[in-house]
Amino acid sequence: MLGRENILWAPWRMSYILNLEKEEGCIFCRAASSNNDRENYVVYRSRHSFVLLNIFPYNTAHIMVAPYRHVSRPDLLSSEEVMDLHESLMKAIKAIDREYRPQGFNIGMNLGRVAGAGVESHIHIHVVPRWAGDANFMPIIGGSKVMPESLEDTYSRLVKAFKKIE
């Protein structure tokens, strides 16, 4: 029997879980076309791309940078779209640096399901800030990742950080 000390409470996740089945289509296209950035955790928009929080983060301030256009590979983007995507990525790194002071980053793109893409039809770049000691025993022993900050708080902090680097 599990003791009380083995329970990790995350009640804010229930609304997401209950809406999983209701949502259809591409999460990136839905966020790109919505006027409600807070609801979609969009922290920054440029002409051809946008930045949003990953709602299943590996670490605090784990964001994704995506083009507005629904394409599965970067070579299908125009040169202007690629440059804009890259500039949004650089701004994301600066905003996270300014607000969270990570000691490193994991940055990458998974193309295709076999490469680990959760959404393979719309490219996106993951930016995961890293700190010494951020990988601990909880995921290995407990099968759980402890997130020290809510998505709402991360959203507010990053929106402000992006405004400061503009």
Image: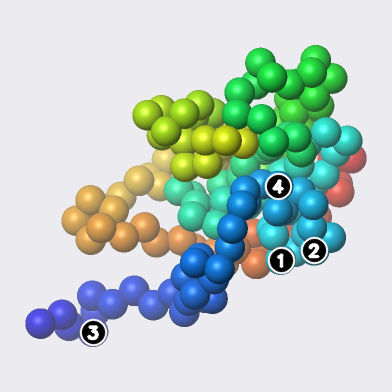
C-alpha gap between disc 1 and disc 3? 33 Å
Say whether disc 2 or disc 4 marks the residue closer to the N-terminus. Answer: 4
Position of residue 11 measured from the top left corner of the image (x, y, whole percent): 47, 79
The crowd level at tag 2 (other Cα within 10 Å; few <14, some 14-19, many 20+) is: few
Position of residue 134 measured from the top left corner of the image (x, y, whole percent): 40, 47
Residue tagged 3 = 4
Question: Mark 1 or mark 3, which is nearer to you?
Answer: 1
* Amino acid residing under circle 4: Cys
State the SS at label 1.
helix
The crowd level at tag 3 (other Cα within 10 Å; few <14, some 14-19, many 20+) is: few
* Amino acid residing under circle 1: Glu
Residue tagged 2 = 36
State the SS at label 4.
helix
Q: Quadrant of residue 109?
A: top right
Residue tagged 1 = 39
Q: Are marks 2 and 1 in contact (CB under 8 Å)?
A: yes
* Amino acid residing under circle 3: Arg
Seen from this angle, which residue lies furthest left?
Answer: 1
C-alpha gap between disc 3 and disc 2? 38 Å
The residue closer to the viewer here, 94 or 38, is 38
State the SS at label 3.
helix
* Amino acid residing under circle 2: Asn
Name the side, left or right, on which 89 lies relative to 137.
Answer: right
The residue closer to the viewer here, 165 or 33, is 33
The residue closer to the viewer here, 85 or 100, is 85
Tell me: residue 113, above or below residue 30.
above
Residue tagged 4 = 29
- Kindly tell me whether residue 17 is visible in this rendering: yes
Say whether disc 3 or disc 2 marks the residue closer to the N-terminus. Answer: 3
The N terminus - image quarter = bottom left
The C terminus - image quarter = top right
